Image (cartoon, rainbow, N blue to C red):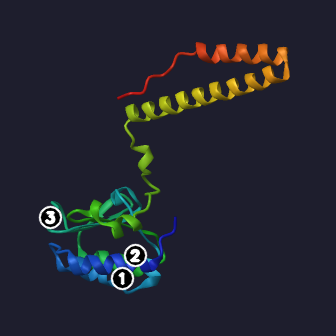
Amino acid sequence: MEVDVREKKRFLDWLIQNVTFQRREVSWILNYLANHEAILANVRFVEHAESTERGIVIRDLSVAGEALTLFLEGKSFTDSDQIFHEIRLNWKEPLYLECFFANSWDHPTYLSILEDNPYLSWNESIDPTILTAVNDYLAEEQRRARITELYQEIDEALEKGDKETFLRLSQEVNDVLQKPEKKPVE
């Protein structure tokens, strides 16, 4: 999903106006991004920017940790001049930006521009228990749908007087019913 540059700019403008950072350089860098659409076109707002080849994490006053950190191929940098020059000199390269600020998960503009991190997809970090429960649920729903479908086909076979199809479908229903029903995990 490609997020429109205007939406990114709107969010950055809001962030600069409404959020206080530990270092003023954070606002300067965000302002630079907001005012350079060619660069902003290559910015992706993601979670876990530290896992990307070129990511920046910013934090407001309410969040513990370094206010501004650049992650570049496994190394981290906090010097704002170095970070600015990295952005300016490599503006054609993808830049992954993660923003930590108070109530970020309640902010619709931020959520609307948040994209999946290609280096750490959200569905790769799902708890295996939850994944098993979802897969079991889907398998059970598929089983129930198949039983309903077979009953409809049996009804049609009875209406047509097709004994052979009736017997075959009845056996298939019995086979499906013999499979243990998976109880949903609560």
Residue 34 numbered mark, or none:
1
Mark 1 or mark 2, earlier in chain: 2
Q: Which residue in the structure is indicated by mark 2?
A: 8
Give me the residue at 28% from left, 62% from top. 106
Q: Residue 161: where, in percent of width, then height?
A: 85, 18
Give me the residue at 37% from left, 55% from top. 51
Q: From what the image shows, is residue 184 above or below residue 174?
A: below
Callout 3 amino acid:
Ser
Residues at marks 3 and 1, CA–CA distance in whole angstroms: 23 Å
Residues at marks 1 and 2, CA–CA distance in whole angstroms: 8 Å
Callout 2 amino acid:
Lys
Front-most of residues 164 and 155: 155
- The answer to whether mark 1 and mark 2 are in CB contact below 8 A is yes
Mark 3 burial class by Cα count in 10 Å: few <14, some 14-19, many 20+? some
Front-most of residues 77 and 56: 56
- The answer to whether mark 2 and mark 3 are in CB contact below 8 A is no
Element on which disc 3 rests: loop
Mark 2 or mark 3, earlier in chain: 2
Mark 3 or mark 1, earlier in chain: 1
- The image quarter containing residue 103 is bottom left
- The image quarter containing residue 50 is bottom left
Q: Which residue in the structure is indicated by mark 3?
A: 62
Q: From what the image shows, is residue 119 above or below residue 131?
A: below
Element on which disc 1 rests: helix
Mark 2 burial class by Cα count in 10 Å: few <14, some 14-19, many 20+? many
Callout 1 amino acid:
Ala
Q: Residue 175: where, in percent of width, then height?
A: 65, 14
Question: Looking at the image, which residue sits at the far bottom?
Answer: 35
- The answer to whether mark 3 and mark 1 are in CB contact below 8 A is no
Q: Residue 137: where, in percent of width, then height?
A: 48, 31
